[in-house]
Image (cartoon, grey):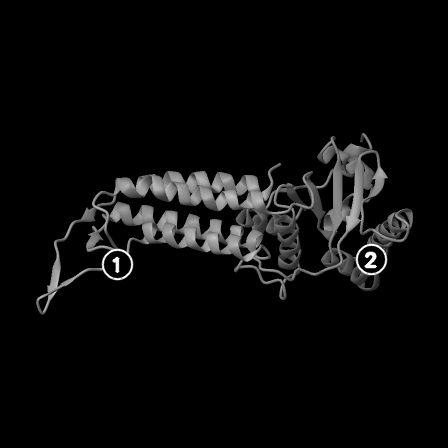
Amino acid sequence: MKSLAMLLREDAEAIIDHLRTLLDMSGIVVRGEETIAGFVVVSPYGNNVWASLSTEGRRVQARVNELYREFNERLDLLLDGAIEDLRCSHHGEMTFVLSVIQQHHCTSNIHVSEYTDAVEAAVRRQVALISNLYSGAEEPVFVPDTNALLYNLDLGAWNVLRPEGVTIVLVPTVLAELDKLKVSATAEKFRDKVDSAIRRIKGYRVQGGGSLKESVKVAGKVFIKSIAAEPQGKTLPWLRPQESLDDRLLASALEIMAKNPRAPVVLVTRDVNLQNKCDHARLPFVEPPDPLLAQGV
């Protein structure tokens, strides 16, 4: 299980590998002084220009540009609430790296190799910004969807997800869906299962002195807590939290990730579409424990 900080470090190394390939395929055209009406024109960025890339070079450029865009989308989630100097540092490094990837600007450099170490260092400095952020937790956090809770109501058996300890976090989207299902479910057996899930959650709240704001022991090394806030911060641009319950759940999980950058945050779901979205969001997921296996059937 990997935290968002660990995932971003992996992403950074992949980007650096692609940047090396891109720069190996790049060139710089050295130009002499330009004059207009007898005056020497000096660009603050230099008079040399990037050479046109080959077709293969363009493909590599497009790939690293996409990887770097996704990397910055996730890093933006972490830095959204950070102090201004961290966000300014991030923006400055990002501007430089993008200039090397897109190669639109003039340059005073003569050799492409002059960019290699500098651009790698810039990407690594972006990752290093994470070490300045507060992480509310360090241990893995498991965020179940509604179907996962109903699939295996025995949360004590969820210790198989991580024998060293499991912390289950309930988000408002899931609790609201349970309340809705309690009223709208037509099949009696399913409605009974929903009622059972709600009773258990209320029982954990009583056990916690009337609150699930802090972790409450379920059984063994399994703990449960809840959060009250719907996702409010920055999220991935392709998510639509106001239109889709799955997207809202993902946005909540990503917000938990952003507040706990050094804690692995894992979505628990059996839904293949939600698993697919987790893949694209770089959000780890697992399936809930099979209740029959837990019973030794």
210 to 19, vertically: above or below: below
Residue 296, image x, y percentages: 81, 30
Three-letter residue code for mark 2: Ala
Q: Residue 264 carries which label?
A: none
Between residue 113 and residue 32, name the one nearer to us: 32
Q: Quadrant of the C terminus?
A: top right
- According to the picture, the residue beneath numbered tag 1 turns out to be 44
Q: Residue at x 72, y 58 (%)?
A: 173
In this picture, residue 128 sits left or right of residue 61: right
Between residue 275 and residue 22, name the one nearer to us: 22
Q: Earlier in the sequence, mark 1 or mark 2?
A: 1
Please tell me how crowded label 2 is: few (under 14), some (14-19), or many (20+) other residues with Cα within 10 Å.
few
Q: Residue at x 80, y 48 (%)?
A: 214
Q: What element carries label 1?
A: loop
Q: Of all residues shown, which one is farthest toward the left?
A: 38
Q: Is mark 2 on a helix, strand or loop?
A: loop
Residue 158, image x, y percentages: 77, 38
Q: Nearer the viewer, mark 1 or mark 2?
A: 1
Three-letter residue code for mark 1: Pro
How far is the residue under mark 1 from the one under mark 2? 72 Å
Q: Of all residues shown, which one is farthest toward the front?
A: 39
Q: Which residue is drawn at 68% across and 39% down?
A: 140
- According to the picture, the residue beneath numbered tag 2 turns out to be 187
